[in-house]
Each structure stands twice: as C-alpha cells, then as structure tokens.
Amino acid sequence: MKPVVSISLTVLFTAFAASAQAQESFRVELGRDGETIADMRPVFLEFQSRPMPAISPTEVARRYQRLFEHSDEPEVRIDALNRLSNIQKVTDEDVSFSEEREQQVYRQALESYESILDRGAYQGRLDELLYQMAKAHAYTGQAEESIDRLRQLVGLYPSSSLVPEARFRIAEAAFSAGDYAEAESEYSRVISSDGTDSLKTKARYMRGWSQYKQGSSARTRAAKTFLAVLDGVGEETSGFRRIPASDAELVDDTFRIVALMAAEDRGVESLASWLTDAGGKGFGYLLYDRLADYYASNRRFEDSVAVNNAFVRDFQAHNAVPAFLAQNVDVWRMAGQTDRARASRAEYVQAFAGDARYQQLAKADQERWQNFSRSLADYHYDQAEEGQAERQVASFRLAGGYYSQLAGRSSQKGDVLRLAGDAFLQAGDHTDAFAHYQRAAYDTDHENKEYPGAADAAWAAIVIQRDALDNRNSLPATLDDLAAAADRFAAEFPEDERQAGLTADIANRMLAEHRYADALRFAELAIAHPLVSPAERYSAWVAAGEANLAMASYGLAENAWRQALALISEGLLQEGRAKDTDSLKRQLASSIYYQGEKAASEGRTDTAVAHFQRVESAFPGSDIAIKGRYDAANTLLKAERWQAAVNELTRFRTDYPQHDLTPTVGEKLVFAYQSSGQLVRAADEIMRADEGESPSWDQQLRAAELYHKAEAHARRNRIYVAWLNRDSAAADSESHILSQTLRQRLVLDDVEPRRYRIELVERELASQWHSEDTLVWAGRAAIVLGAEESERFADVPLQIPLAESLARKQAALSAARERLSQAEKLIGEGAGSEILFRRAELYRVMAQDLMMSEAPANLSDLEATQYRMLLEEEAYSFEEKAIDLHARNHRRLAEGRFDEWMERSLQVLADLFPGRYDREVRWMTWNEEVNDDA
C-alpha cells in the first residue's frame, strides 16, 4: 500500500497510559528515514512520566473544550480534542460535548485535520489523527470519508491499538450497507485481533448477525457464532447469573436471534443439531426456553409445546424438566385451550408420579405436583358427575387414580383416600374402591378425630363387600369376609346404629349361601333384636320365606310371605315399602306355581293344572300368572290330552296376543293337531299369518306336505305354484330335487302339465344334481313332449308347393327327435324300446306322407311318373330307417326283454313284412340248471 502522505512529515503520538496516567512522545521524519512507510525508522525521544494534577476530570475537560474553541492552531485544537477523548475513556463522568455541539466541533476539527495534512507535519500520533478524522467524518454525516480514513489507519498502522476498533467500525459500515459477507470478514478480523474482550464479544455478536443476514445457507455458521457469544458471556458471568447491565441487552438479543433462526429453520430439530455440533452447552435449556417463548408469543402454541417436550425427552435428568413441563400448561392456557392445558398437567403429574422422581423435586415443584393432581382429580370427578354415561366410567377412574397418588403426599390423607374410594366406586372398580375405603377407615387416627369420616368409609367398604356377594361387583369376597368385616366394624365403631341392619343382612346372605339353618337362626336373631326396626324384621321374614322355599316347604314359604305382606298392610314400614307388595305377591304366586310344578312332576295332571291356574288369582296379570296359564297347556300336552291342550292354547293366544310366549303357541297347536290326526288343521295353523306377515317358504312347504298327506291337493298346489314362480335357480341338490318333485306332482294333478313337463326336462338337463326319480320324471316328460311333437309332425300335410310344406314337416320332425333324444339322455335304457318305437314311427310316417303327397297339376304323364318315382326314392330312405329302428327293437328280444313297445314294433314289422314277422309267439321260461357232472 502506498503511503497516505509523500511529504516530509513529523508525527507526534500522544496517549494516556491508564496505569501511570503519563504522557509519552516520539518523533518520526519520513523525509530522512525513507520514502515509504516501510522505510520509516522511529526515533524514540526520552520522556518523563509525571502524575496528573489533583483536579477533577470535568474541570480538565472544560479547560480543553475552551482551548479547542479559542485556539487558532490546528495542532492545538486537535490535541485538545484528543485529550478530551482520552479523558472520557478514563473516567465514568460524562465530559463530552452535547450532541448538537459535538457535530459543530467535529466539523471544525475536520478543518484542522485538513490543515495539518496540508502543512505536512504533526507532532502527535498519526493513527490517532486518522481515527479522529474518521470519527469527525462520521459525526458530520460523511460516512464514505470516515471509512476511507479508517481503512488508511488499518493499512498504514496495522499494529496500532486503534486498529481493532477501526476494523469494527469498517465492519459496521459494511453491515449497514448490506454487504454482509464483507461485514462477516471484517468482524472475523476484529475477533482474531488484539482488541479487548468486550470488543471481541461485540464483534462476534455482529458477525453472527452478518451471517444470519446472508440467508439460510449461512444459518448454521450464524448459530455457531451466536453460541460462541453465549459461551463466552456464560463463562464470564458464572452461567449468566451476574450479567452486567451493559451486556444484558446483547445477551438477551443473542438468545432471541438463536431462537428466531431455529424457528425459521427446522425449529427444535435445528436447535438440537446446533447444540450437538457445539458439543452441548450448559445454557442449552435457556435456548429451548427462549424458542418455546418465541413460538408462544407468536401464537404458535403447538410448536412451543413441541419444544418443551423435545427438551423433556432429550434431557430427562435435567433439573429444568419440571419447569418445561409446567410451561406447557401455561402455553395452552395462553392459547385458551383448557383441555390441552389439563392434558399437560396430567403429563406433569405422570412424569413425577414415582416416589424416586417426586423426592427429587424442589419443594415448589412438589407443591405444584400436588396442586395439579388435586385439580385433575377434582376436574375428572366433576366431569364424570355431569357427563354422559359412556364417559363417566373413564372419568371416575381417572379421578380415582389422581386421588390415590395424591393421598400419601397430602396433609388431608383421610379425605383424599375417601374421595379416591368414591371415584373408583363410581367407575365400577370395586377392588380399588374397597382398598381405599379400608385405608381411609383404619389407616387414619379416627379416635383423635383426625378424620371424622372414618366410620362412613368403613361402612362403604362393607357395602362393597356385600354387593360383591350379590355379584354386583368383581371384588373377591366371601360371606365369612363380610362377617369378619362386621366384627371389625363393631369393634372400631361400637356406637354406630347400622349394626342391627348388618346382622339382618348377614341372615339373608347365609340363606344365599344355602346355609338354611344359619339363615333361619340369624333371621330369628334379627327379629328378636331390641333395636331391630320394622324394616329389618320385614327382611328377616323374607329370609324365612326364602329358606322354606329353598327346602321345598312351599306351604310354609307361603305363610312367610303373608307375614311380610302383613307388616306392609299394618303400616309399620316406610311408605316406600308399599312398592314391595308386588314383589311379595310374586313370591306368593311363585310358591303356588312351584306346587303346580311339583304336582306335574309327580304325574298328578289335574292337580298341577289347578295349581297353575290358581297362580293368576294370587297375582293377576303378572308374568308368572301368564306363565302358569302357559304351563297348564303344556301339562295337558305332555299328558296327551290333545283337545284340552288345543282349547287352553287357543285361549292363551286370544288372551295374550302380544306376550313373548304367544309366538310359540302355533307350533304347539301344530303338534297337537298332527298328534290327533288333524293334518289339514295343522297345515292351516302353519299357514296362519301373524300380524300380516306370510309364513316363510320353509313353513309353507311344510304345510304343503301336510296338505299332500291329507290329499288337499288344491291348497297344496297353490303353494307349489307360488314356490316355482319364484324364478330362482336351485342352489344345491336338495332344492333341485324338491323343485322337480313339486313339478312332477303338478303334472300328475294336471296343473299346466305342458309347462311343468318342459321345466322338468330343461331344469334336469341344466342341473348338476340328479336323483333316480328326477331323471325318470324328466325323461317321461320328454317322451310325452316328444309324443306331442310327433302328433304335430303327423298333422303337417305335404302339399304343393312341396318345398314349403316339406320344410315345415322337417322342422316338426327335428323337434320330435330332439325331445326323444332328451328322453334317451335322461332315462337311457329305462325307456329304450319306447324311444326306438317312436323314432321309427317318425320315419315311417314321413315315408307314408311322402308317398301320399300330391303331384303338381301341370305335369305331363311322363313327368308325373318321373315325379312319383322320385318321391318313392325319397320315401324309401325314410322307410328303411323306420324298418331298421323297429328291427333293432325286435332284436332286443334276444336280450330277454319284452314290453309293449317291442310288441308294437313287431306289429309294424308284421304289417310291412308279413311273411317274416306275422307269426304266433309263445313265451316260455327257461331255468338253467347246474350240471353236477360238468
């Protein structure tokens, strides 16, 4: 670099030494030492250090200000300005000019600087001169000139103590101009220079900003730089515990920008990556917190919670985990999402539910845990009470779990345990409810009234045990367990008035255990007890009735029910007991009903029927009374008293048309009618439409079969026709055979015979399922259809024009032959002779019709003769076929077979060849005997 000045220049460098407060100076002459800065040789002058006079910095500054304002010498003005600057550096007092005056001063200073440069000599330090010129340019709004002076200073005096600050100002200018890459480079030079730690911190901070401003590609570098800034400040301030006021804004802004960059990048994933690349930082949790705060302040609540959760996941052992989990609650509350806030409370509670983790919490965090647990428990309990049935169980179970966790850590142990028991009970979790009630009753000091609700809790546990014996909950309990609990209850709470009722209840439970003697004994004890109430006495009578009933002493049981009813009728019970009247009447009716059952089992039909019918007088209109009527009919059926059973069943259906048992009456009537030989009535009962609904096809076919057996063909055929009109293909062998059977029966009954013969043939040929009967039926149908086609064939005359009539004749012939082929395919040898005969007759008729056909009228005698000869030739071939088929029928005689159709073939052959076939035929039986000598 070329020197800034080329003239001989004497420069005087002056500076304050902070420790000695002394002035030092030396002289350099460029003209003598060399032409360039590289050739310069400093000449050190001796100096003496003297202490500053005892005068305040403010007064010294004032004097220098006056010197600057009144001196005409540029060197003096500049020296005064430099000294003012140095004084400001070494004192905490404000000795500077006002802002407006400072700008005026620096404009004047620029004139002095330029004057010095024009003269070519200066007794001070040139680097300070350039720095002050840069500063003056900056204050007067001449930014480019200021940077030029700073670059001159850096280039000419790279070892100057002003270089770091000069580079910092250059970097600042580049940053302000938007040249962020240049700014990054200049800040890096400041960091690697000999500047102060404070300046390096600021340079590192601004380098991070320069990198950030370069966009996403430089974001990782920026993060690394900002983390270095925080690392340095953290070390200097004992982990940010004692941050100087001057650095507070920088530290806060650094945390903020790192959070901002993470949010602009991949969020918490980027933050975690940057911290990992940096080797992990003790202050990392503060960055997580700042990122979460940033998201929350920008209403990105889900992202905020994600940051907190990421920290909790990745740093599970960190002591800030409770704060991050608690912060989730605050975030969701800020978002107005109470459900999520509640869920975050639940996560907090779950995270420290274990004793080990809970004990590691600070006292404030433990209190927060307790508050969260209680609020969650209360919330879910309230929600369960107010919510819909399908959600109540889950809500009560959640509430119980929170209460249970809280109980051992709460000062209100008994109350919380009782609440846990209540919640579990409402949730249907009787095992946990019982355990918590027991703890509330017996694990608290109720004698000293620490928990006055202990007796109620104990009773609640007894109620659960009692309900368990009634199979109303799944608690594993026995009657002996309940008895032991009653003993403990009596011992702990002897004055509780509920003991008498408990004794009566145990009597009933003994009965339920089939310990009938014990049941009667406890019932008597309950009735005789001095404090027993009418209700408890009533319960004892009921137990006595049940015991007698269980021992089949139905008469005694009936008496017990009457005693219980008497207590109600005498008004000794609460009004609510009046509703038990129906129940007791039902028990009374049951006793009578059981007497009927017993008589029926012993074969005393009349007595049994009388008892069953008597039930209705004991409890009119009741289900058991209706069942008594029904069983009276059943008893008559079992006794095979058919008409009486029919009458009773008919009356039952008339009296109770809507009862659940009524649909079964029809089948019983069918059974009675069939058993008594009334098949048509049985079928009519099956076909009876209930409530406008037709019987199923299975039922209709069942009825049709009964009609068939009863020879009620008209009713049967209506069902057959309806079934076949469904146009439904057979799905299996059974349904195919059924349909073919119905068609055959309709044919036999002459119901649309041609239609059903055709269906018989077509369905059998198309089906993959066959039986011997269906093949025969279809084959016979095909033969009949073939015979009909043969008749139509014979009725077609051969007349002029012969070609047209012959075509009709041949079409009829083909139709007849097709039917006979179908018959042969279906029956085979079963109708072979008939099929041969009918085929032969087709050809014989064809030959005869050809011979009998008329000749055209316009033929000459010769032509007529020729025409007749042609017809004979055609007819001959048909006659030969007919003879051959009849002969084949004749040859079947040799196989030992003879039937009507073979005989008819012989008659035809005899007519055609009388000499050969017209003879007497006598059949003899031949029995081949075994020759013993053979």
Image (tube, rainbow, N blue to C red):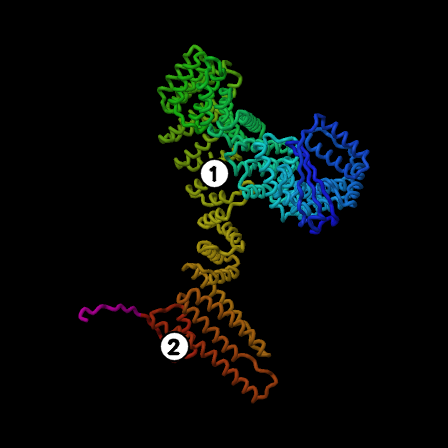
Secondary structure of the residue carrying tag 2 is loop
**195 left or right of 8?**
left
Residue at 49% x, 15% y: name it: 450
- Residue on which disc 2 sits: 918
- Is 25 or 833 nearer to us in this picture? 25
Q: Percent x, y for residue 628?
A: 45, 30
Please count the marks in the image. Answer: 2
Badge 1 crowding class, 10 Å Cα cut-off, few under 14, some 14 to 19, many 20 or more, is few
Badge 2 crowding class, 10 Å Cα cut-off, few under 14, some 14 to 19, many 20 or more, is some
Precedes in sequence: disc 2 or disc 1 = 1
- Is 786 or 357 nearer to us in this picture? 357
- Residue on which disc 1 sits: 664
Q: CA separation, marks 2 and 1? A: 72 Å
Quarter of the view holding residue 176:
top right
- Give, as a three-letter code, the residue at label 2: Asp
Residue reaching furthest to the left: 933
Q: Percent x, y for residue 135?
A: 74, 40
- Give, as a three-letter code, the residue at label 1: Thr
Q: Percent x, y for residue 242?
A: 60, 30
